[in-house]
Image (cartoon, rainbow, N blue to C red):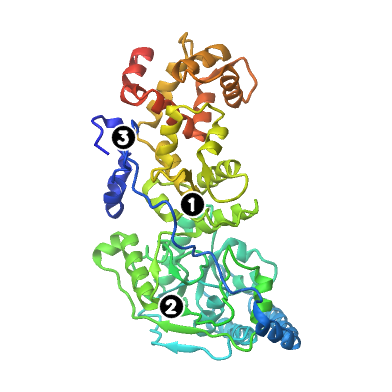
Amino acid sequence: MGEMGTEAGTLFENLDAFDEIQEEAVSACGQDSPLGQLPALEPDMPFNPFLAKDQHIHGLYELLKTILLLPICVARLMVILLCILFAYLFSKVALVGAKDWVQNPLPKWRRKMLWPIRWVARLILFSCGFHWIKIKGRSFPREQAPVLVCNHVTFVEPLLIFFKHLPVIVTAQENVDMPVVGAVMRAIQVIAVKRDGPDSRRVAAAEIKRRAMCNDWNPVLIFPEGTTTNGKVIISFKNGAFKPGLTVQPIVVKYPYVHLDPSWVAHGISIYYLLFRLTTQFHNCLEVEYLSVVAPTWKEQKSPRDFAKRVQTNMAQALNVMVSEHSFEDGALLMEALKWKDFSGGASVEFGWFELVYKLKLREAKHYLRKFHCLDVENKGNVTFDEFLNSLELPNCPPLEQTFFLFDRTRRGYINFRQYLATLAFISRHKNFRGMLEAIFILLDKDKDGLLSEEETVQSLRDVIPSVTAEQAEKLWEKVNKQKDHFINKMEMFSFLQSNPEYVAVLVVAKPDLVWNSRTRIEETWGT
């Protein structure tokens, strides 16, 4: 696609900050558009790191083995339950009379009282079939590696590293809020993070640095992926472990399974069924490798993301897997999709890429996912042109076809959620988006009184797209006019278009001068 000659035809300015993404982001999408060049994006994801395989009972051997081991399974589950209760009691005893234990490290004698819980963790692993564990490499002392980072596949890694190091674990607040396990976590002085709270993340990052820099604390353990995966890829790292600019020791964990994939992921079985499957195996394999410590360079101390990328690459090489820009938010989107019985996996979009390029938030992505679900009523994972057209309730005409091609840049005749999200994010983050909203309102406001009546809105819309019927225009008016008033003000129109940027694309395609001359229109009308 040729470069647009106007300021409005270029990608939004924030892309300048992303050196690694910039070359891809300015690639042509293969067609001319008044909106400018859309970022290059592969329409399909070749893999889903949140999909687990081989977790259900398949074949005669697995069925017979499960039946044979049922009595052992019951015994193992009873041991696990007793271990959890034992850990809970020891945690309570260790904190009796303790003061300021939330902010200050426990005295050594109190920490020794927690040592039995370490062996409880190992006994739980043994009961789950991890009888012997292959360990490669060596663990460096806390003075040399105050921060430990590990890939995250299932609930096993926290138990294993807790047994080996009794570390300060960084975990989600919802884990600390659990009835019995939460008490144990509070006793071991975890750092809790609220995933949806930016202030919580900032406070947690400061707490990580404070504890990592003080040798009175045990080493800090962080799972920088922020969620569990199937272990076939290393997803994007959160920066919390790397902001302090301290030396880290990466730990990689492998599960060379034959019959049971032990990963606990969004597109997998529940934790209860996973425990059942683990305890009905003769043995489950687990391999751990301690990698060499990684110290940040001077540049990486200023750029935690670069430090995180280097550690991520080292861990991926040790595991012989790829790296991706998937993140915790992808898992959250998959869980949202599962609420509607959508098992296509299309909600996994490599959210880290969207976060980098568009500064997209999970809340917005969920909003667009709900919109996509309304289009994809059969949960097949894609939307055709006819379905897209029906959702807009507009006629089949060249502007609508051109708008669909903004989404369907590969001309396959259908789009998936990844394409849908990318195009809506591009439109809503366009550097001239506000100007387009202003120009659209000016276009519809024929009498220039700052309010839109139904009559003038219907007439203006039919002037832009002549094939629109009066009935279709009235339906669109009703969508915008949620207050059921006689008039729509500017803020109501802006709110609707911000939530539904596809209508902005339709109007811009039908009237390209909304972008190219929007600033002039605004100045002439409002005198600003």
Q: Which residue is mark 3?
A: 32
> Picture coordinates of residue 332 (x, y %)?
55, 56
Please indicate whether residue 244 sits to the left or right of residue 386 in the image.
left
Badge 1: how crowded within 10 Å, few (<14), some, or many (20+)? few
The kind of residue tagged 1 is Pro
Q: Which residue is mark 2?
A: 252
Badge 2: how crowded within 10 Å, few (<14), some, or many (20+)? many
Q: Is residue 4 visible?
A: yes
Check residue 198 in the rendering and tell me which mark sits there, or answer none.
Answer: 1
Label 2 vs label 3, nearer the camera: 3
Helix, strand, or loop for circle 1?
A: helix
Above or below, 94 relative to 323: below
> Picture coordinates of residue 57 (x, y %)?
66, 76
> Picture coordinates of residue 161 (x, y %)?
51, 80
State which quadrant residue 122 falls in.
bottom right
Residue at left offset 49%, top offset 17%: 462
Label 1 vs label 2, nearer the camera: 2
- Callouts 2 and 3 close, C-beta under 8 Å: no
